[in-house]
Amino acid sequence: MPDILKGKVAIVTGATRGIGRHIAKLFASEGADIAFCARHGGEPMTTLEKEITDLGRRCKGYIADVAVMEGAQKFVDQVVADFGTVNILVNNAGISDDNAMKRMTDEQFRRVVDTNLGSVFCMTKAVQPVMWKLGSGAIVNMGSVVGIAGNYKQANYAASKAGIIGLTKSCAKEFAVRNIRVNVVCPGFIETEMTADVPAELKDTWCSRIPMKRPGTADEVANACLFLASDMCPYITSVVLPVHGGMEDA
């Protein structure tokens, strides 16, 4: 089914690298116009804009801090002004700052939770009225297997991703009356720029715990997001979709 997102406008947060970048480019290749954001501009933003416009799609990057309500609302308002509407939201922006619980600072905990969970809340709240008026929409949130199973030295990250799951399920119930679907994708160990510096021995240890014996790819996560964002699954909402090669425990 070519161009399964034809005629759609998609927002992708945190799209200048890693999984978000792959999602934006895949959605564009399937016919969507793309609005994306990052906290900083520069070469990654302009390069992605060019790559997507070269595909024949409209694309614009915005500098925005979507972890605060004012930043998220301004971003969505600008997208609506430039593109006319929003059909799809992918909440991908996120950070990690690992530490053992006994050494984790209040600032470390709050910064990760505020960025990862706070951005999902702010962007969802900002985009809801647009989709509500349309009577349709798809929101895909980026969770993690760590939000399901927890992980050593990642209490802050696990809390943020577990919170995203709860927020997703609550919003799915509230928004279903207006045909707005809300789902969450939970990747496991995925090879991206963020994992490029992980020592080979540690990668081997992680892979030994994965039944498929390999890390996932950003494209595999992007494909899962594409399915949930598309009209191929009009009756799927409130779903937690793991993309982890069978790894049940982080």
Image (cartoon, helix red, strand yellow):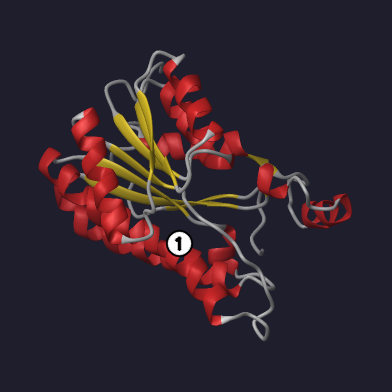
- On the question of residue 173 being in view, the answer is yes
Q: Is residue 81 above or below residue 67?
A: above
Foreground of the two, 9 or 167: 9
Q: Total label count?
A: 1
Image quadrant in which the N terminus is located: top left
- For the view shown, which residue lies furthest in the bottom direction? 102
- On the question of residue 191 being in view, the answer is no
Residue 187 horizontal side relative to residue 213, left or right: left
- For the view shown, which residue lies furthest in the front direction? 42
Where does label 1 land, which residue? Answer: 115
Type of residue at label 1?
Thr
Question: In x, y percent, where is residue 147?
Answer: 53, 65
Question: In x, y percent, where is residue 32?
Answer: 35, 25
Question: In x, y percent, where is residue 206?
Answer: 78, 56
Tell me the crowding category of disc 1: few under 14, some 14 to 19, or many 20 or more residues within 10 angstroms, Cα based: many
- Residue shown at 26% from the left, 57% from the top: 70
Image quadrant in which the C terminus is located: bottom right
Residue 239 horizontal side relative to residue 71, left or right: right
- For the view shown, which residue lies furthest in the right direction? 201
Foreground of the two, 167 or 14: 14
- Residue shown at 47% from the left, 51% from the top: 93
Residue 33 image-quadrant placement? top left
Q: SS for tag 1?
A: helix
- For the view shown, which residue lies furthest in the left direction? 133
Foreground of the two, 237 or 219: 219
